[in-house]
Image (tube, rainbow, N blue to C red):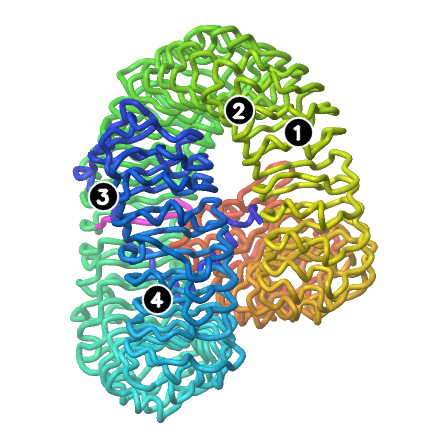
Amino acid sequence: MSRVAAVLLLVLAGAAPSPPAPPAPLEPPDPAAVAPPPPRCRLAPLCLCPKDHFICNDVPFHIFPESAAVGGARHVSLAGAALGALREGALAAPLRTLLLHACRLHALDPRALLSMSESLASLDLGYNELSALPLDALRPLRALNWLNLQNNHIGELPADAEWGALGDSLTSLSLSNNELVVLHGGALAGLRRLTRLELDGNRLRALQPGALPPSLTALLLAGNLLPGAPPDPLPRLQLLQLRDNMLHAPRAPPPAPLPRLHTLDLSYNQLSAATLEQLLQTAHARRLVLDLNELHELPARVFRPPLERLSAAHNRLRALPAAGLLRARRELQQLELDHNLLAALPPELRELEHCRHLSVAYNQLTELGALPPRLQSLGAAGNLLARWPAALAGLEPGSLRRLDLGYNRLAELLPEYWGPWSAALDTLDLRGNRLAALAAGALPDTLPLRELLLGFNDLYLVDAGALPPALRVLELSSALLGGALPAGAALAGLQGLALDNNNVHHVTGRDLAAFASLEFLNLDFNKIVRFPSEWSAGGAAVPRLRELRLAYNYVSHVEPAFLRQLPALRRLDLAHNHLRALAGGALAGLPALQHARLCGNQLASLAPAALRDLPRLQLLELQENRLRELSAASLQGVGDVASGLVLNVSHNLLNSLRGGGGALPVHVLDLSHNRLEETSEEFFSSVAASVRRVDLGHNQLRRLEHAALGALPRLEVLLLRHNNISVMRRRALLALPALAELDVAHNQLRALPPALLSGSTQLRRLLLNNNLLRSLPRDALAGAPVEHLDLSDNLLAVFPGGALGGAGASLRRLELGGNRLEHLDAAMFGELSALRELGLARNALSVLPDNTFASLARLRRLDLAHNALKTNFKELFHNLPELRHLVLAGCGLRALPRLPLEQLTHLELADNRVAAWREADARPLAALRVLGLARNELGALRAAMWAPLARLVQLDLGGNPLGALGAADLQPLAQLQRLRLAHLPQLDVVSPLVLAPLLALRSLELDVPAGGALPGALLAAASHVEALTLWVRDEELAGQLAGLRAPKLRVLEVRGAALQRVAAGALAALGGQRALALRLAGTRVAALPAGLARPLLAVPHLALDLSDNALVDLAPAALYDNLTDWNRRATNLLPGGLVVSGNALRCGCAVAWLGGWLRRWAAEAGAARGAGGAAAAGWCWRGAQRVPLLELQADAAECAASALSSRAPPRTAPHAAELLLTLLLYRALR
């Protein structure tokens, strides 16, 4: 699912598709307050050493830095390294905090932390590979109060665990996102001072009595499989989070009350009123969250005091209990009922005298009726309001601060709507209504309104006389029919103005002069050609403007004199316009500018001093232009000396680099994806004093001469991959003393010069894969402390032992796959005893002596895939006691070999001929977690096969000749989380109970039988599955999903090379999901039917990925039934986004609406979640030209004529309603 992660995971992050947050002026830090970067460490130049700190985040360490490098630091951070294990004495320092985040740690030596037993207070071991609690290393830590173990592989906590000194020190423990299934009695009871415990994201089905310490005040259990509340008495508990469990079946209430409970989260549990009644018998919280359940009514117990905040959004409520509201009238302060079925509000709401926040968005209200009198915030978006709510007049004077009436049917805004109730109104949201004009007087001058959101209306008139003087933020996204900017004295106080997605053609200096206080101006997605359109010398300035957005226009000229009158400008976005050249001084004299985006234009040249006097610039984006030359003289006085400049000139047509001018404080230089055939010492001399990372990948470099880049004393990373380099001179790297990473992969190197790395005393990572190397010079690595060496996919026929000797003490990872090696023996590895990872796949190895790996006792990963091995595996691996990952795919194996590897956790045996194995052969593999058996010859399964492998969490059985799956065939695998059963063409008999023993299953991949549907009973046994991939063999997707009942399903992927059509009702079974990322991929589907998304209208969190199909066009009728549905839901139908990449979409009227949809989605539903970048990933084809969907524009009349023309290409005639909806959407999304 990696292709869609950027978009689809937006929908699974938990953010509800309620009315989106308004665009607001950005507040970057004050340039004067930008602190200089912390100093580099003297003995570890890739790391930062501010006072008392040693920070090495995302540095490719395989070896823990020496104590001398850490020095006297009290706070050490090593995130993203590849340490593997923490040995005794690795850190002989009295640290206060230690962060070893994502360091691939699988073990801690019991004495590894002894030096800090009296000092360490905070320890982060998250995102590692720990399969068990490292209690022996943790017990001595007397000062530790915060411990993070989230996102490891911990599957069990010992009952009655002995926590040592932690029992009296630890107050916060995170075990989130591990593999816990049961919490045994006494497991955490020894942590006597523990107040916060995070267990969310495991597969917990049971909490045994006595498992939890009574000291807890916060207990997070979200995302598990618990059927009920914790059984232990927790007298101090204030926060209990049970979101996304399995509480839908009635269970007995907890045995003891929770007297101090403040917040109880029961959302996403399919709760019924009866189950909720039971759960609340002994739990009375001040804040109660019931979102995303199946509640048709709220029991009276819900409103029992001391309830202050209640959220019951995304249920099926049609009414509220009058008695319950009256019961809570003195305590209830916040009530959220979004996305229900309420047609009216009860009069008892008026009795909620302390209620300050009420949200009833996306219900079926035609009027508001009674309201709590002292409301400060009211949300009623997405209803059916056609008239201004008269109930607002009943509010107490000056109480309401925020009013959201967006996405209703309001057609006018009149002066008489306002009264004493609005005397303190601060924010008014009227987006997505039917407003046609904002006439003078519509908003009285006395209104203290500071933020007004009017986007997605069809306003032909915006009279500045309608805007109150207090207004500071005005949002008019996709709202101005005529494209004329509002003007008038009332605009002088505006600080933020959003005019994106309109038809703005002209913005003159006089227009801008009206906005004297403006700090944020968004003009993205308009039709501006020149900015400002008219400008005279000495024209009025906008002195406070901090951010100016002009992306995706037609701008070919920006007036330099205007820009120079923006002294506060920090961010300038001119991406994806029609700029062809930058003359001298085009971008100059901006003392505060930090970020300039000029990417995606047609820039062919930069004149000398084109960018000048930009002393605070930190990021300059020039990628995706047509530049043929880059001269340092074009950048004069550019870059922040303190923090450095990131300069991106990738994806241009550069064939020349030139020097000139003064020094440039560039830290990161990206020159990749160009046409450079040689480097320029003169150019690099201009960045020599500062540059730390240079990317020259994907160019046409042929040679790397002596000092090809000149002297770059601070360069740490040099990327030269994907060039045509065939020669590297001996002294090519001599002037790069700080170089730590060198990537020369995918070139034409046939040999390396001797002593190439003699001066590379800091080099840790050397990538030479995918070249033409036949050998390496002796002692090729001498003088370089290389930790990671990749020589894969070369022409090596002999193991380069002599070349590696110089790095024997430092080398930790060696990749030799895809070469021509035929022979290995123990002598070859004699000097590589420190090696941890070894890749030998795809060679010509056959017979390996028993002692081949005798000197590699610390090896943790070994890849021997696709070698025709004939060896005694028991003896071969006898000397690898620490081996954890072993790949033997495609080695000709007929049976599971006897592997004496008690620490092995990953075993890949795909593409062999394994038909079965004896239980005795698997018994030494009791620690195994991941087993790949795809494409073998397994014809039948037996429970006894898995008995020794009870810790398996991932199993791949795809592509085997299995004929049947019996009820007990997988019975011992209670901890299995990921199972692949796809591509089993001979499978005829499947017991509906085969998945029943898999109590922890998260991910499942299955075939759908040809001509059939998913067996409902089979999936009922795995109703807790979260990700499901289905391979469909039929030509049409119709009723195959009918048996799908999986309330926790988050990701559904449907694939099938034979699939050509989708029936309108194919998704009918998915309407009950609460969060779903739906992907249809790898098919031959060319069109989607009208009404396809209709069953998904009730899914609160929905994303749709249609990538990698054969789609030629995509009609809006597939998503929206009619214009009313569009007006009410807009892009909130798919808050997680719509992905259509990898298709053959033809640019034109059939898909032009998608451009407007994506633009609106980026502004409307995903503005705060990085949606802009995701929306920019969609393309269509105009002949052989690939065109971004975001750039598509369509005129309704033009498309109507095209669709009705007899000269149009023959196609199935569209239904009249479909054609009408398409044309109306062109207008709405213009």
Q: Secondary structure at mark 4?
A: loop
Give the mark nearer the N terminus: 3 vs 1.
Answer: 3
The magenta span reads 518-528
Q: Residues within 10 Å of mark 2 (few under 14, many from 20)?
A: many
- At horizontal 62% and vertical 41% (from top left) the residue drawn is 1182
For label 1, the SS is loop
Front residue of this view, candidates 610 and 321? 321
Q: Sequence order check: which comes first, mark 4 or mark 3?
A: 3
Q: Is residue 274 above or below residue 670?
A: below
User: What mark, if any, has residue 29 been given in the picture?
Assistant: 3
Where is residue 555 drawn, in percent x and y?
A: 39, 39
The CA span between labels 2 and 1 is 26 Å
Query: Element type at marker 3?
Result: loop
User: Does residue 580 appear in the picture of this structure?
Assistant: no
Position of residue 645 relative to residue 774, above or below, is below
Quarter of the image where one finds residue 1163:
bottom left
User: Looking at the image, do the residues carrying marks 3 and 1 touch, with CB atoms under 8 Å apart?
Assistant: no
Q: Which residue is mark 2?
A: 698
**If you read the primary sequence from the N terminus, does the residue marked by circle 3 or circle 2 appear first?**
3
- Would residue 285 be found to the left or right of residue 897 on screen? left
The earlier-in-sequence mark between 1 and 4 is 4
